[in-house]
Amino acid sequence: MSKVHTLTDAVARIPDHAVITVSSSSALGCPDLVLKGIGARFEAQGHPRNITTIHPIAAGDMYGVKGVDYIAKDGLLARILGGSYPSGPSSKPMPEIWKMIVEERVAAYNVPSGILFDMTRDAAAKRPGVLTKVGLETFVDPKRQGCAMNETGAADPIVSRVEFAGEDWLHFPNIVPNVAIIRATTADEFGNLTYEHEGAYLGALEQAICVRNHGGLVIAQVSRVTRRGSLRPHDVRVPGHLVDMLVIDPDQKQTCETPYDPAISGQVTRPWESFALAEQGVEKVIARRAAMELAPGMTANLGFGISAMVPRILLEEGQPEAVTWAIEQGAVGGMPLTGFAFGCASNADAFVPSPQQFIYFQGGGFDVSFLSFLEVDLDGNVNVSKLGKKPYLTAGCGGFVDITSGAKKIVFSGWFEAGAQIEMDESGIHVRSRGKFTKMVKEVEHVTFSGKRARQLGQEVLYITERCVMRLDKDGLIATEIMPGIDGQRDIVEASQGRVRVAEDAITLPLSLLSTDPMGWGA
């Protein structure tokens, strides 16, 4: 008997007060049609009401895949836990989910993506919740915000700080989902799912197991259906006995602004010369200096922003495969993509399910992580997860906290000031006029990375900007390397209001970082 159902029939099975876990990463793998159907049913019938949704990675974007915005309605959505949220430029309207959060119309939490996947596994196995050190001394810790994004969320805590075996831990009690909404490319009539057009597996298998183990409902959105027995067993990523209902959407996008690119799903391999190189400019200089922290044979994690340019630096140096990249959506190796396709990779060696990727990250198995920052403070704390004036300009923490909690070495990249007039020529980088404000602040708005915790763990931490390379020592931030053309006293010490010191033995970085020619990486 076929498990294919109409959208109307599928969403009609979702009860009031449901706890729904959604597999998605922005538009990558987003079951957008099913989320749209839930919103439409609520508008027509007033049901389901007061649901809780769990999004280990964001559902939807701001560029045509609405995702969670379909269900961001008063009376429908009561509580939301997200590793990340739809984000974009200030020129676009604020997403509906962000309006609900800032207007206190929903209890909202930003929980590290890896912890949300941990919660899924522990709830599936009926263990007593997640016990973790991920997030200690950050906004995740109840000593600070305890993941709450607003007062409504803070009134209903989801995490506590406990002592176990003489050490401090964070405990997340189980939040058990009774509905899973996942996505794949192909299903057979029995519900076996394959992912041949997808750019990642994400956490669909774990989410389906969790809901099945608690007697709930699993809905899978797919682009096509074939007869039972026609799928190769090795290709099935979610077996049909875990799936209750199939909804067909032949128009589902592969990811943001991308209907389908076979290189993203590993069905073709692109020539290396087909990838664009990093555009010449100051951000490329920052990325080049970051690349100097790599050596052939390393495995590196990669985040959004300037850091995402680092693989293109190695490409320009003629060594695109010298380092293995690992990103939280699950791609390993190849060339991580930028822009709308961030979170995907072409020419990947493998796709690992996100929950397993986060086990690797939390345990610190990789050599170095390249991440970005919004602001850094006197204690070396970093904020990437909150901007009070424009909250939707950041997606939240995503996997940032999981990654930094166990990393041996972390390289943050960003701008020293906001809005400064910076020029670059063959002699160096020059600050022609001061910025609106420094990003080296007295105290960050949100502690996404704890400098105190990093010192306790002995992590090596660098902050690379267009002016200098700073390191975290026992007294805070100290600039140990100066970009050519930069005046240390004026452009660093005074521009940071004295919050950054310049080391007495600080060196000037080589002009080769500014060259239009390859810089000789790995030589």
Image (cartoon, rainbow, N blue to C red):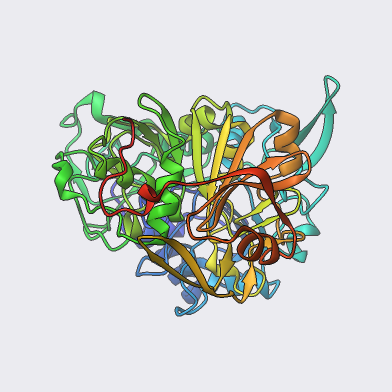
Q: Is residue 129 left or right of residue 319?
A: right
Q: Is residue 167 above or below residue 197?
A: above
Across and down, in percent, residue 446 comes to 70, 57
Q: Is residue 173 left or right of residue 340?
A: right
Q: Is residue 69 visible?
A: yes
In front of the other: 501 or 115: 501
Which residue occupies the foreground of this view, 388 or 40?
A: 388
- Name the residue rendered at 25%, 59% in the picture: 258
Residue 490 in picture, x, y percent from top left:
64, 66
Which of the pair 523/22 is nearer the observer? 523
State the residue in front, 233 or 154.
154
**Residue at screen point 45% across, 78% down:** 92
Query: Going 45% across and 62% down the picture, which residue do you hit?
Result: 429
Task: Say which quadrant the N terminus sits in.
Answer: top left
Pinpoint residue 204: horizontal percent, then vertical percent: 42, 40
Q: Residue 421: horizontal and vertical position, in percent?
A: 49, 75
At a point 17% along the width and 42% down the height, the residue shown is 272
